[in-house]
Amino acid sequence: MENKIRQIKQSFEEDLRAALPTGRLADIRIKYLSRRQGMIPSLLQEFRGLPSEQKPAIGRSLNHLKQHIEEEIRKGENHARTADRFRPQEDFDITLPGVPPALGSIHPISQIQEILEGIFLEMGYSIEEGPEVETDFYNFEALHMPKDHPARDMQDTFYLPGGLLLRTHTSPVQIRTMKKQRPPLKIIAPGKAFRRDSDISHSPMFHQLEGLVVDEGITFGDLKGTLEHLCRAVFDEGTRVRLRPSYFPFVEPGAEYDISCLVCDGKGCRSCGSTGWLEMGGAGMVHPEVFRTVGLDPEKFSGFAFGLGIDRIAMLRYGIDDIRLFFENDIRFLRQIQDCGGY
Ligand code: FA5
């Protein structure tokens, strides 16, 4: 009887080892514990026929074995139940590619700004920044627009408490740069500007890029050459540039510059209002008064400055007819621009 108990224990351990990974323990429960065919009940049957002096020792071994088998089967079944809960319901193919995460992209205005910066960095310009909340001095006074100057009306200003305002253009960075650095100067200043203005081609917040070059012997020809190079680099080699006399208090002479219409190539169409030209921005030679304000001798130094609307360039470049679309954060619009490739 002792031998049988040992053999059953050994065969149970082997069966258990084989059954555990599959989680199928019902078969060994039947094999060892079922009342009709189980090995333990039939051993108990045999046990009853033993002489009474053998019963205490054999009975103990038999009980231990029975408890051990019940315990191990219960543990195995619990384990299988837990593993089942975490097992994927269906088989899956781990070689299938995953779902790609949605990627963001650079905003079209930032893309154009980066392209413009690249063009100027190649020409040896450096990039300057100035505050968006400005003082009246930098935004107007130092740019030769005293308090009652009518030119102030050209730029509907957002005024803030404490004599501050949201800069209406990037030109104040000209003043800040000339006050802290001596010529030769060759800088651009891209950034946000703000005006009380809103329609399909005007936004209350928009982006400008200012350019300033100051040295001895800088001429209007240098300005024209720079603008021509800029427009051809941004659009294409065949783009023509024209300068028209215009007035900005901080330059003399002042001009506005246009490019030949990208749609009709100068013949006249709806996009250019039949003029054949598209307006790009303002420019001119730095006014002697501005030089005096920043402590530079206008007899010694000359310079040119220009400003352009980054958003307007983006509109031309991507064929967008309403500037407000850029700032509505409609992901479908931004995706469309991303898909059309831009540059
Ligand atoms: C100026 O702001 C001058 N500071 C430019 C300048 C710089 C002249 C240096 C001379 C020397 P203007 O107001 O024209 O100029 O604006 C320049 C460009 O900014 C415009 O041609 C236009 O492209 C853009 N712009 C102006 N207002 C808005 C607006 N509300 N929304 C979008 N773009 C605008």
Image: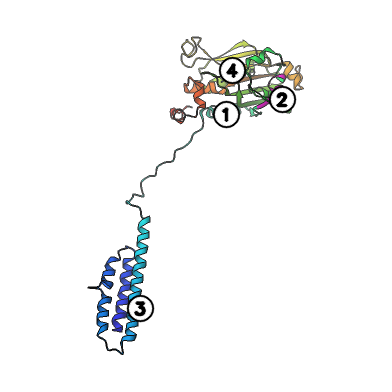
User: Residue 341: x percent and y percent?
Assistant: 45, 28
Residue at the disc numbered 4: 281
Q: Nearer the viewer, mark 1 or mark 3?
A: 3
Marks 1 and 3, how far apart at CA:
84 Å
| Disc 3 to disc 4: CB gap under 8 Å | no
- The residue carrying pointer 3 sits among few (fewer than 14), some (14 to 19) or many (20 or more) residues within 10 Å by Cα, namely few
| Disc 1 to disc 3: CB gap under 8 Å | no
Marks 2 and 4, how far apart at CA:
22 Å
Residue at the disc numbered 3: 64
**Start-end of magenta stretch:** 133-141
Q: Quadrant of residue 241?
A: top right
Please state which amino acid type lies under the numbered disc 2.
Met
Q: Secondary structure at mark 2?
A: helix
Residue at the disc numbered 2: 178
Q: Nearer the viewer, mark 3 or mark 2?
A: 3
Looking at the rendered image, the quarter that the N terminus falls into is: bottom left
Please state which amino acid type lies under the numbered disc 4.
Gly
Q: Secondary structure at mark 1?
A: helix
| Disc 2 to disc 4: CB gap under 8 Å | no
Can you tell me whether the CB of the residue at mark 2 lies under 8 Å from the nearest atom of ligand 1? no
Q: Secondary structure at mark 3?
A: helix
Q: Mark 2 or mark 4, which has the lower sequence index?
A: 2
Can you tell me whether the CB of the residue at mark 4 lies under 8 Å from the nearest atom of ligand 1? yes
Residue at the disc numbered 1: 118
